[in-house]
Image (cartoon, coloured by chain):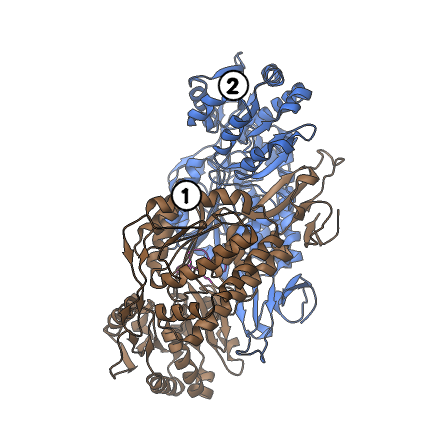
Chain colours: A blue, B brown
């Protein structure tokens, strides 16, 4: 049952009068549920409860946290088809996508459960005392990662499950021992409430303290601003627009106590197609990219929005095939009228720039909220001179930049902003001749791909989802995979601390069998 | 020979007209050398050279970087007694301290050399492809830490060697593969130039690119501001005052591309002495702390500036002994007239607050720039009500807070700001009865000490030197020990990248024998 209320810890709450609804973009009608926007009082209550819960939750064992995370997954599964239905009603995304994203959400929660149960993430480091050292005795020092404090999570519009209420950010923060307050995404507040209920049930069933999780409804910017400014919040995770992410970053930086903001803000994900690849298989590449550009109606942050090549018969062939292929794909529904209208606005702005050729655009009429995919083309020089062309158009859009020569290709690559991904398409080892282009691309991305597409972000330890600004606010951390836990921890040292009062991970007897660095050597041995 | 010029890469440069000198605080006279303040043009040149050098230096092997770091250490040793003499002339610190700090500097450089030679710091993580996985094949992903870019290092006033030109920050950044631009500390610009010369010689002898290191003289704030705002700078390391560190943090946060600032800004390092310890050995503890408070004329960031206890005969005994002991110590010279006058000013401000008792103060006349040590005492209630009493007084000063009871002790602990360290003095396992006090302290510090003193920061992997704001701007990193390299790296993923083009750490053949996480397991095996 969707109540439309907030969860302040384990209790439902609706103190405010401001309400909003979600929208069914496929039917182009409002959904029936009415949501109560959280009030300032409710924001404060959630933050105070979180700070209280932190005292207990930050000390809970990895095994207990694993049990809690697995129970969340189980409770989400227990929501059954209702969750998938609400997901589709609030996003317009098909049932298959809903099920796939739920699977991803469950596997993320379980991966973090395994990660904290194994326990190596605390990076236990021990330097034992040397009482006889000259000229001064050496003290005993033992360091490990501990949880940072309460985390505010801002759900993403384009992943109502995997990057939202119980998505990667929440799973990582809870795994780290941090209470989480979710600012629910207004476009899928019902999905968010159902998932919140699953988390609350898991809290109750595994005996976690109330306040470890709260869910705040919000259709405006105030709730988010208050959360980021609340002194009990120690870190922020956000997935969304550059404008939104930067605003939160700026607010957090101005606090008396500045806090880290991990904002993943999108990207145009440049793809460089080298000459031999174009010569050998322009058609195949074009077909693959028509699929990647339109995947999920272009609503992935790794959507390939910029394709770079050097003028040649192969590039012309690629451009022509891409144009044919892209319009042959059936237009699909965007997740919300606001997303659809922003897409149309941004697309119109870009295609009206001087020197832009529209290679192909869906011309037939489409249903409301459906996106007409477009690919454009431009000369390298024009692209270099016009920063508007470098901006992301969120949706099924891509621009092909036709460079005069390798120098121009390298210059363009060196002038790109930070990106989540960069891709090189190369045949016959020609990549070895383009070391400078590759170097420039590497410096601007978080993940570099060889002969593939940027869409499809595998959840695994070796994934890096993030990148130099403005792809993210902090290139030093990933938002996907178990290493994303590192965002929410700080190392902490105990000096000459009594063995029985140390956390288990640092005691002489390595009862948890974690991998430790002891006097410079990696070992699982006891001391 | 000290020229007074800047190093822009390997070249001496003095384009500006603004000059300054350093000061001999023991003799209370200016030193003879005249230093040329760097101009905006020189700042830009250094940053551009660094960006150029980054292209080469970021790809250099761990073994080559180790050779370079060891050569720097060797060249610093080669400066011989001249370095120690200039150090003392510019700081007033004795020859023994100069030699000790040089030893620490050399051992830090060599520790980082060993660290990057061993190579595990890249945290290589590999998930191999699963072409047959259903419903989608899994790609091959390989992740490792790479260098962040050029780093601006702001030397500390109180460690002319170990936290300055070739100190911990510079060693960590160079080890990470980042070019370094030092904003030389104006109080020891001659020491800085000598060390710079050693680094330049090491660059030349080991074939590193010019621009990997630059040294900029500066007596004002402009050079530092320009450095932090330069788009080629990707991170900042700073040791100094809260005011200075926060100003740099704010500047960096306002950039188009915000960058991380690692500012270590000092602390009052609270010490909680529990009742039984006071009862059993108040005199011994007082003697130890009189030494810790005055060590290095109180000019250590871990100086114990705040001592907390519960009223008792033991506490009275402690306070009386501390008073006797502190004035029995011979006053010593501070590093600069500005530091000495700031100490006098801050001390006067605090001792004139309502409710403050001066327990003991050196009353005899001292030489110019020598500090008169002081200890004061105050009731818990008065301390709680007056934020001025919570502020650091940099120098040989400490305040003893006499709490009414355990509740007041806990309340005070819970209201402290972030600290580098916290210390518990405890006998007969009484610490077990003070879990709440310990919990509050843990939440506010980077390192917690049992029955010791906070002064003395061991350089070892398990050290955490940093802490919650305002002790540092980012509690998630240490400024001391090999893990401080983590500040200057970002993880980077290669997807389906050709094996021969991968960095050696990620190739199938693990020729460097680094510890890698392969498909979730730690191993040094080949793939």
The disc label shown at residue B433, or none: none
* Mark 2 Cα-neighbour bin, 10 Å: few <14, some 14–19, many ≥20: many
Which residue is most to the top?
A: A364
Magenta span: B466-478
Q: Which of the image's four quarters has the C terminus of chain A?
A: bottom right
Establish if A121 lies above or below A447: below
Q: Which residue is mark 1?
A: A248
Q: Would residue B477 be visible to someone looking at this image?
A: no
Q: Position of residue B505 (x, y in %)?
A: 66, 48
Helix, strand or loop: magenta stretch: loop
Which residue is most to the right?
A: B132
Judge depth for marks 2 and 1 and give the one in front. 2
Decide if residue A146 is on the left or right side of residue B47: right
Q: Nearer the viewer, residue B50 or B300?
A: B50
Question: Which element carries disc 1, helix, strand or loop?
Answer: helix
Decide if residue A482 is on the left or right side of residue B100: right
Please report the residue visible at 51 percent of the width from the left and 66 percent of the height from the top. B77
Q: Which of the image's four quarters has the N terminus of chain A?
A: top right
A103 inside magenta stretch: no
Picture quadrant of residue B319: bottom left
Please report the residue visible at 59 percent of the width from the left and 80 percent of the height from the top. A132
Q: Nearer the viewer, residue A32 or B379?
A: B379
Q: Which residue is mark 2?
A: A376
Please report the residue visible at 33 percent of the width from the left and 45 percent of the height from the top. B40
- Chain bearing mark 1: A
* Mark 1 Cα-neighbour bin, 10 Å: few <14, some 14–19, many ≥20: many
Question: Which element carries disc 2, helix, strand or loop?
Answer: strand
Q: Position of residue B323 (x, y in %)?
A: 33, 84
Q: Would residue B505 be visible to someone looking at this image?
A: yes
B471 inside magenta stretch: yes
Q: Which callout, 2 or 1, points at the residue further toward the start of the chain?
A: 1
């Amino acid at each position: 049952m969707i109540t439309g209320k907030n969860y302040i810890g384990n209790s439902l709450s609706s103190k405010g009068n401001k309400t909003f609804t979600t929208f069914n973009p496929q039917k182009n009608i409002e959904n029936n549920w009415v949501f109560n926007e959280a009030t300032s009082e409710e924001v404060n209550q959630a933050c105070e409860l979180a700070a209280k819960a932190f005292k207990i939750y930050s000390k809970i064992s990895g095994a207990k946290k694993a049990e809690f995370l697995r129970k969340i997954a189980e409770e989400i599964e227990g929501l059954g088809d209702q969750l998938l239905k609400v997901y589709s009603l609030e996003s317009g995304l098909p049932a298959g996508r809903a099920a796939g994203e739920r699977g991803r959400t469950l596997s993320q929660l379980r991966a973090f459960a395994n990660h904290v149960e194994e326990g190596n993430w605390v990076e236990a480091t021990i330097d034992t005392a040397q009482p006889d050292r000259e000229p001064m005795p050496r003290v005993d020092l033992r360091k490990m990662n501990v949880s940072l404090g309460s985390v505010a999570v801002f759900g993403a519009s384009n992943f109502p499950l995997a990057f939202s209420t119980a998505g990667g950010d929440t799973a990582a923060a809870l795994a780290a021992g941090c209470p989480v307050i979710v600012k629910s995404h207004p476009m899928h507040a019902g999905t968010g409430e159902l998932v919140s209920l699953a988390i609350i049930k898991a809290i109750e069933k595994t005996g976690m303290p109330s306040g470890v999780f709260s869910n705040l409804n919000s259709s405006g910017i105030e709730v988010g601003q208050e959360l980021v400014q609340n002194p009990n919040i120690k870190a922020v995770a956000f997935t969304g627009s550059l404008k939104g992410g930067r605003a939160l970053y700026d607010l957090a930086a101005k606090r008396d106590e500045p806090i880290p903001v991990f904002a993943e803000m999108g990207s145009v994900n440049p793809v460089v197609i080298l000459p031999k690849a174009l010569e050998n298989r322009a058609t195949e590449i074009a077909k693959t990219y028509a699929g990647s550009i339109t995947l999920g109606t272009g609503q992935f942050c790794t959507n390939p929005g910029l394709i770079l090549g050097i003028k040649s018969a192969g590039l012309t062939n690629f451009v022509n095939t891409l144009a044919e292929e892209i319009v042959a794909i059936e237009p699909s529904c965007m997740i919300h009228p606001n997303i659809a209208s922003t897409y149309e606005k941004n697309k119109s702005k870009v295609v009206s720039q001087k020197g832009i050729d529209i290679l192909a655009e869906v011309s037939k009429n489409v249903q409301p909220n459906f996106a007409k995919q477009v690919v454009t083309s431009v000369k390298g020089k024009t692209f270099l001179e016009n920063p508007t062309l470098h901006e992301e158009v969120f949706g099924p859009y891509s621009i092909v930049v036709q460079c005069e020569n390798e120098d121009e290709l390298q210059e363009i690559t060196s002038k790109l902003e930070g990106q989540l991904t960069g891709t090189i398409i190369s045949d016959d080892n020609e990549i070895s001749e383009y070391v400078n282009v590759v170097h420039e691309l590497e410096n601007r991305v978080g993940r570099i791909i060889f002969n593939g597409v940027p869409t499809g972000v595998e959840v695994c330890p070796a994934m890096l989802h993030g990148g130099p600004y403005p792809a993210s606010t902090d290139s030093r951390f990933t938002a996907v995979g178990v290493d994303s836990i590192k965002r929410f921890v700080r190392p902490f040292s105990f000096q000459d601390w009594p063995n029985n009062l140390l956390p288990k991970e640092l005691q002489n007897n390595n009862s948890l069998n974690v991998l430790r660095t002891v006097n410079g050597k990696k070992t699982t041995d006891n001391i």
